[in-house]
Amino acid sequence: MYKEPVAVDEGTEEQEKARKCSGSTYLTSLRSIRRQRALTQRQLAARAGTGQGTISKLKRLEREAHASTVQKLAVALRVTPEELMRERPLK
């Protein structure tokens, strides 16, 4: 079932980029960026104001992220929303 993304306050360029993300998306780079920041899933969830289960499902690509979640995670990880969605080469 589709849920309308939560509106993000107007103002910053990052918020505008998150607003442009259509409905929902998979966050293909979440795990690698989180590890680069030396954060556990629990720590990232706390910073982003989401549940650890949500982070786990997003990492395993079992769940799509709404634009509001993309924005929260981008802020918590100090990256742009586009960086979370960018394909990363396997190491």
Image (cartoon, helix red, strand yellow):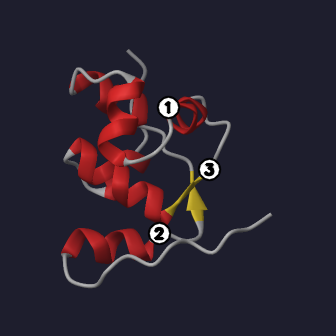
Where is the N terminus found, in terms of image quarters?
A: bottom right
Where is the C terminus found, in terms of image quarters?
A: top left
Examine the image and state in which quarter residue 12 appears. bottom left
Q: Earlier in the sequence, mark 2 or mark 3?
A: 2
Task: Residue type at mark 1: give it.
Answer: Gln
Q: Position of residue 60 (x, y in %)?
A: 59, 29
Crowding at label 2, few (<14), some or many (≥20) Cα neighbours within 10 Å? some
Drawn side of residue 2 relative to residue 27, left or right:
right
C-alpha separation, residue under disc 2 versus residue under disc 3: 12 Å
Q: Is residue 83 visible?
A: no
Residue 52 image label: 1
Q: Earlier in the sequence, mark 3 or mark 1?
A: 1
Drawn side of residue 19 relative to residue 51, left or right:
left
Circles 3 and 1 in contact, beta carbons < 8 Å: no
Residue 18 image label: none
Q: Residue at x 20, y 83 (%)?
A: 11
* Above or below, comparing residue 91 to residue 10 in the picture: above
Q: Position of residue 34 (x, y in %)?
A: 32, 29
Q: Residue at x 37, y 46 (%)?
A: 84
C-alpha separation, residue under disc 2 versus residue under disc 1: 23 Å
Residue 64 image label: 3
Crowding at label 3, few (<14), some or many (≥20) Cα neighbours within 10 Å? some
Q: Residue at x 28, y 24 (%)?
A: 39
Task: Residue type at mark 2: give it.
Answer: Cys
* Above or below, comparing residue 58 to residue 25 in the picture: above
Task: Residue type at mark 3: give it.
Answer: Glu
Q: Is residue 81 visible?
A: yes
Q: Secondary structure at mark 3?
A: loop
- Residue on which disc 2 sits: 21
Crowding at label 1, few (<14), some or many (≥20) Cα neighbours within 10 Å? some
